[in-house]
Amino acid sequence: MKVHFKKSITFKIFAVTSILLLVATALVYATIYFILPGYYTNYKKQEINGNITELVKKLNNYDSISLRDALLSYTKNYNILFYIADENDSFVTKYDDINRVLLFSNQKSVFSTVYNTNGLNTNEVTTSLTISTSDSESKFNYQLAKPIKIKDDPSTYYLHAYASLQPVSEVSLVMFRLIPFILIAIFIISLAGAIVYARLIAKPLLNLNRAAREMAKMNLDARCNPLGSDELGELGHSLNTMAASLQNSMDSLKESNRKLELDIEKEREFERQRRDFMASVSHELKTPLTIIKGQLEGMIRGIGVYKDREKYLRRSYSVTEEMEGLVKEVLDISKMEASNFKLDIQRISLSDTVFLCLAKHRDITVRRNLKITEDIGEGIMINADRKLIIKALLNVINNAVNHSPEGEAVMVKLTQKDGLAYLEVENSGAHINEEDLPRIFEAFYTVDKSRSKNAGSNGLGLYIVKRILDMHSASYKIANTVSGVRFSAELAACGK
């Protein structure tokens, strides 16, 4: 756990920030301690020098009384002591009970500044000193002299100024003694600042790291939040955008895979149906061929009933016609299922097409005493392959006619509503078992298990209808009604 913490970004930011803050504050304190006293001393010297120069210019040619009063006022305000020496390098200093008072000497017309002389109460002290216009200084004091003129006195005097720099040295000493406390304060402040800074910086980084790890696990719903407007915020926005894009790509890929799986499954189902279809075709052809072979062999050998060659030749011919019809339908189905097959789409009148298909069944309906009821809307147009639509309608009507008992009715209705053409073909007197309805459109599936010639079905009629309507994107179904069986279909209409 400790090793992991030392490797974490939070610890690294904390350590670096702490060191930087400690070094920075130590440098600042060292700079203040070592450089500030010297800088402040030079600054005070320049300031005093400038002020005394301005003062001398102002006090030149003052009388002795005015000069004394002005120097006393300046001393009180700026804590600078003065004395005046003559050209002979001598001055007279008098002390009173208050000490720091500027006194006047009648003997030599000289002003002098009184210092605190640690109890020295001499009334008058005369001494000699060397006067120079250059500055003189000691470690804690600063002294300079400037020439000055006194009114009505031709002599030249020098105004000596004396300033103490002791407060600056005392500040340095105090700072030196406070170093341990300052270091402790610096350490605490640096530590607290480093903790706050580390959390502020590390928190969004840890948030980004958490989100990135989730995204690496393909959890693309993970997001970086909250987000700011800085570079880390922009990085978080970029990660969120990338995750959303990846999520969309993954969703698209999953959808494509799903469709591909469906296509593969459809292809497998189609291949299975093709195999079943070919097996059924083989079976359907095998039965009539066996019948024809048996009849021909019987006629050749003159066995029993087959001696009536004329009768069984007609029967053989009838079987070959059925086989021909089956082969034609198989060829039509193969052609429609070919990959290069294309619909010949054109605008046709569905109304006229239905009338045409009903007319072709007129004779058989009369022969079987079937009643045809027509309710055909006029001018209903669709875009479709005319030949295939005719074939589908013929198969539907033929299926209804062939499976209606004699004397029943076949009702055909065609209407248009909301851009759709609705076709209904219902034959009365018929019924389909519910378990047979889901398979009614399968190839070679017949409700009439006996497949009698009266039924006239080989099991491909409705399968062909299904293929044709699927290619035209039409919906269709067969259902039982109260009176019989109804076929219904919906096709897209294109006006009248």
Image: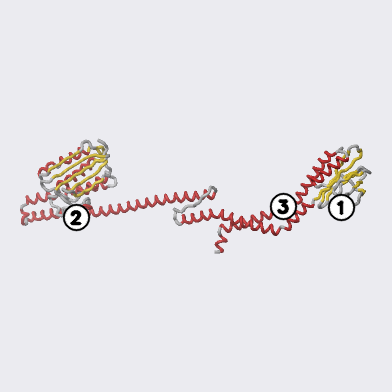
* Label 3 Cα neighbours within 10 Å, binned few <14 / some 14-19 / many ≥20: some
Q: Nearer the viewer, mark 3 or mark 1?
A: 1
Q: Nearer the viewer, mark 2 or mark 1?
A: 1
Image quadrant assignment for residue 3: bottom right
Q: Using the rendered image of the protein, determine whether residue 134 is visible from the camera's viewpoint.
A: no
Measured as percent of width and height from the top left, residue 213 is found at: 48, 56
Quadrant that contains the C terminus:
top left
What is the number of the mark on residue 32? 3
Q: Nearer the viewer, mark 3 or mark 2?
A: 3
Look at label 1 and name its amino acid. Answer: Thr
From the viewer's perspective, tell me whether residue 94 is left or right of residue 469: right
Look at label 2 and name its amino acid. Answer: His
Q: Which residue is mark 1?
A: 117
Q: Which residue is mark 2?
A: 283
Look at label 3 and name its amino acid. Answer: Ile
From the viewer's perspective, tell me whether residue 57 is left or right of residue 353: right
Dot 3 falls on a residue whose secondary structure is helix
Dot 1 falls on a residue whose secondary structure is loop
Callout count: 3
Q: Earlier in the sequence, mark 2 or mark 1?
A: 1
